[in-house]
Image (cartoon, rainbow, N blue to C red):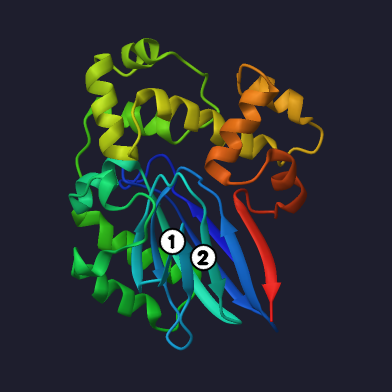
């Protein structure tokens, strides 16, 4: 069962928190999940107190922490879920996440950073979320926790969040994007490196890739039409870029995709 709650625009937390989600699973078999890079900054609470959730990024295998930060990954994350598990997530605006936890992208990109080690109050919040509760009650708990801690963002930071949260935004050159966000090209590249682990040119390409993921869930569009809509130079450029992040070809992703963009599932015994 899946739940999602998107914050209304007039929420006092709107600058920090985009939405909350919850995934609950009870099945006869364990599940192998592949999560390709999605360009989200998430605080994820692993609410399993019996069986561990194992994961792998590249060649590194580990157990998911109780509470971890996940960011602008450039490689897939593999997880092996127990038959029964619950995950609860907060999707944050990128600049808010960096300000809230005083971390840079290098601290959480392509890894699942144990946030309880760097921000101790999250351990108490994890314990509260572990108590029997509905999704709505958990949403209330995290909003209550976040409200006094929410960072004050500048107008530039809000514009930057809007761009990074909208993969369907028009493809721009670095100078054009810098002008739109009121940065110099050099300063923009530094800001993006701190938030995403990528420079400005790499971020522009990443945003095209993210838009392609969303469009591949529209069956009426061909891969050629998707490549054109995302403004790749040609089909070969689209395929090469997609494979570099997702580690599989666009056609294979489309064949294996689930109802959740960026998530591929398979049962294992």
Q: Secondary structure at mark 1?
A: strand
Image coordinates for residue 229, horizontal then vertical, percent:
66, 21
How packed is label 1: few (under 14 Cα within 10 Å), some, or many (20 or more)? many
Q: Earlier in the sequence, mark 2 or mark 1?
A: 2
Residue drawn where x is 56% and y is 80% of the image? 82
Image coordinates for residue 205, horizontal then vertical, percent:
49, 27
Residue drawn where x is 58% and y is 59% of the image? 34
| The C terminus sits in image quarter | bottom right
222 on left or right of 15:
right
Q: Is residue 244 above or below residue 77?
A: above
90 on left or right of 34:
left
Residue drawn where x is 19% and y is 63% of the image? 118
Q: Which residue is mark 1?
A: 89
Q: Are marks 2 and 1 in contact (CB under 8 Å)?
A: yes
Q: Is residue 73 above or below residue 121?
A: above
Q: Which residue is mark 2?
A: 22
Q: Quadrant of residue 164?
A: top left
Q: Is residue 85 above or below residue 259?
A: below
How far is mark 2 from mark 1, CA to CA?
6 Å
How packed is label 2: few (under 14 Cα within 10 Å), some, or many (20 or more)? some
Which of 209 and 176 lies nearest the eye of the viewer? 209
239 on left or right of 144:
right
- Give the mark count: 2
Could you tell me if residue 183 is visible in this image?
no
Could you tell me if residue 44 is visible in this image?
yes
Q: Secondary structure at mark 2?
A: strand
119 on left or right of 71:
left
Q: Quadrant of residue 28?
A: bottom right
Which of 161 and 242 lies nearest the eye of the viewer? 242
């Amino acid at each position: 069962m899946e739940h999602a709650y998107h914050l209304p625009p007039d929420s006092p937390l709107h600058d920090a928190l985009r939405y909350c989600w919850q995934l609950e699973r009870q099945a006869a078999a364990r599940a192998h999940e592949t999560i390709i890079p999605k360009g989200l900054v998430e605080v994820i609470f692993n609410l399993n107190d019996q069986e561990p959730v194992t994961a792998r990024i590249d060649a590194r295998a580990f157990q998911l922490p109780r509470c971890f930060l996940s960011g602008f990954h450039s490689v897939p994350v593999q997880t092996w879920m127990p038959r029964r598990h619950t995950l609860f997530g907060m999707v944050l605006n990128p600049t808010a996440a960096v300000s809230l936890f005083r971390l840079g992208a290098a601290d959480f990109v392509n890894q699942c950073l144990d946030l309880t080690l760097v921000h101790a109050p999250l351990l108490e919040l994890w314990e509260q979320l572990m108590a029997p509760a509905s999704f709505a009650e958990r949403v209330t708990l995290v909003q209550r926790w976040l409200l006094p801690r929410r960072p004050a963002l500048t107008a530039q930071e809000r514009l930057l969040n809007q761009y990074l949260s909208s993969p369907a935004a028009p493809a721009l050159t670095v100078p054009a994007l810098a002008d739109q966000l009121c940065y110099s090209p050099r300063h923009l590249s530094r800001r993006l490196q701190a938030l995403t682990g990528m420079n400005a040119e790499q971020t522009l390409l990443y945003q095209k890739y993210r838009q392609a993921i969303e469009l591949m869930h529209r069956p009426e569009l061909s891969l050629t039409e998707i490549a054109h809509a995302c403004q790749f130079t040609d089909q070969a450029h689209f395929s090469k870029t997609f494979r570099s992040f997702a580690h599989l070809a666009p056609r294979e992703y489309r064949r294996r995709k689930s109802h959740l963009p960026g998530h591929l599932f398979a049962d294992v015994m």
